């Protein structure tokens, strides 16, 4: 057994929450390159580049649920009030019922809150129904507190589904329609990434990754599309891809994730054509490096990695989940009525350099 596979096996059997078996080499520094051994320099030449490459020694496994803290609702992003000049009515989601998968935490949770602030009722879907229920309550309480004069409080519900399982997805969609009467909008945010070098990526983990990111998007979107078609109603969906669907991140190796997110982006394009005649729009949002509880934990343990990532972002900072509230509201609302099959990259300019 090679050293790498031994390290991987050890990592998998001990199952710590986040594993970085090696901190990547310093990035873009002359001294780092200058102090390299001759052998290493030759290897770098042979690999065809000194910086834009993956480092096969990085291993990061997706953490188990209890390892991350629960999120707090976003504050200061309230509904436009008397002191704010009104914006276009077409941006409003009033009267719409939205669903967000993977909505108990991270980007999905904040996008869901953005949908509610924009006027929608919301169904939060997650493997962790307990956390989804907690957050559903918090979202309503936050609206109540920040907008005491609100005539109607939003209805926000929590639902269990494993998005990679068709029976679970179908049961969940039926439950949401039962409680809300309909679904108009869908955001598919359930997904995850892991880092293993390609030649020893455990096949069961790769299948799970594709099952959640790709099958999960496919299953939820088709279930909601069937519901919209039965109702003969228009709808709008946003799939959460990643800039990794268009570029190859460095230095962490993650080939299956990159391919999965490319699939998510092209599923959005393909469905947008197939369902245009039914009045269903489908778009993709491809976030860059975003600061969630998960990435904060990884970067807290690896400050060098944060420097490397940030050095590649023209805006000079990682994104915050709130940076997605506007793009998702735009794409779900009538403001984007003639936008379908598009991919909006919310990445601080990462992918244009
Ligand atoms: N955080 C980033 O920097 C970043 C960047 C680009 C894209 N993305 C994508 O955004 C999406 C959300 O990422 P995040 O950082 O918020 O992740 P996260 O881990 O914080 O949240 C993901 C949520 O999805 C849920 N989930 C996981 N598997 C599920 C399943 N099978 N069924 C139902 N729910 C499930 C989890 O319980 C969790 O609540 C993912 O698709 C991710 O690939 C994230």
Image: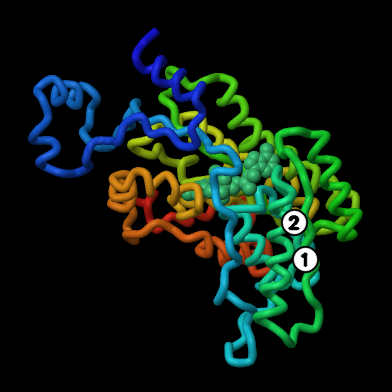
Residue 189 x, y percent position in the rendering: 62, 48
Residue bearing the label numbered 2:
133
Q: Residues within 10 Å of mark 2 (few under 14, many from 20)?
A: many
Residue drawn at (37%, 44%) of the image: 301
How far apart marks 2 and 1 lie (CA) works out to 14 Å
Residue bearing the label numbered 1:
121
Q: Is residue 48 in view?
A: yes
Residue drawn at (44%, 47%) of the image: 297
- Specify whether 256 is left or right of 170: left
Residue 300 x, y percent position in the rendering: 38, 49
For the view shown, which residue lies furthest in the bottom direction? 83
**Secondary structure beneath disc 2?**
helix
- Specify whether 306 is left or right of 25: right
Assign the N terminus to one quadrant of the image: top left
Q: Is mark 2 within 8 Å of ligand 1?
A: no
Res 181 → quadrant: bottom right
The answer to which of marks 2 and 1 sits earlier in the sequence is 1
Q: Nearer the viewer, residue 88 or 217?
A: 217
Residue 230 x, y percent position in the rendering: 90, 49
Residue drawn at (44%, 58%) of the image: 319
For the view shown, which residue lies furthest in the top direction? 1
Q: Is residue 235 in view?
A: no
Residue 148 x, y percent position in the rendering: 72, 85
């Amino acid at each position: 057994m090679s050293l790498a596979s031994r390290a991987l096996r050890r990592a998998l059997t001990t199952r710590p929450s986040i594993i970085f078996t090696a901190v990547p080499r310093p990035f873009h520094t002359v001294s780092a390159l200058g102090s390299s051994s001759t052998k290493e320099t030759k290897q770098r030449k042979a690999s065809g580049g000194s910086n834009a490459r993956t480092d096969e020694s990085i291993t990061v496994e997706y953490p188990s649920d209890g390892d991350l803290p629960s999120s707090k609702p976003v504050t200061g992003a309230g509904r436009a009030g008397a002191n704010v000049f009104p914006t276009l009515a077409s941006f409003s989601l009033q009267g719409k019922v939205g669903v967000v998968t993977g909505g108990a935490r991270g980007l999905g949770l904040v996008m869901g809150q953005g949908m509610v602030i924009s006027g929608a009722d919301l169904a939060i879907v997650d493997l962790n129904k307990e956390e989804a229920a907690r957050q559903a309550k918090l979202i309503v309480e936050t609206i109540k507190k920040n907008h005491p004069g609100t005539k109607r409080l939003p209805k926000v519900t929590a639902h269990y589904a494993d998005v990679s399982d068709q029976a679970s997805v179908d049961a969940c969609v039926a439950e949401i329609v039962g409680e809300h009467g309909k679904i108009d909008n869908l955001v598919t945010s359930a997904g995850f990434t892991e880092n293993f070098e390609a030649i020893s990526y455990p096949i069961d983990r790769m299948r799970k990754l594709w099952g959640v990111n790709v099958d999960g998007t496919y299953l939820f979107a088709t279930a909601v599309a069937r519901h919209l078609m039965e109702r003969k109603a228009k709808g709008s969906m946003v799939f959460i891809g990643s800039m990794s669907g268009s570029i190859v991140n460095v230095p962490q190796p993650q080939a299956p994730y990159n391919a999965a997110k490319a699939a998510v982006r092209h599923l959005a394009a393909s469905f947008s054509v197939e369902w245009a005649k039914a009045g269903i729009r489908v778009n993709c949002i491809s976030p860059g490096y975003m600061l969630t509880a998960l990435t904060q934990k990884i970067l807290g343990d690896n400050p060098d990695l944060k420097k490397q990532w940030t050095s590649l972002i023209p805006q000079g900072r990682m994104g915050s989940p709130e940076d997605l509230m506007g793009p998702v509201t735009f794409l779900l609302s009538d403001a984007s009525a003639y936008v379908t099959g598009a991919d909006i990259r919310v990445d601080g300019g990462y992918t244009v350099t």
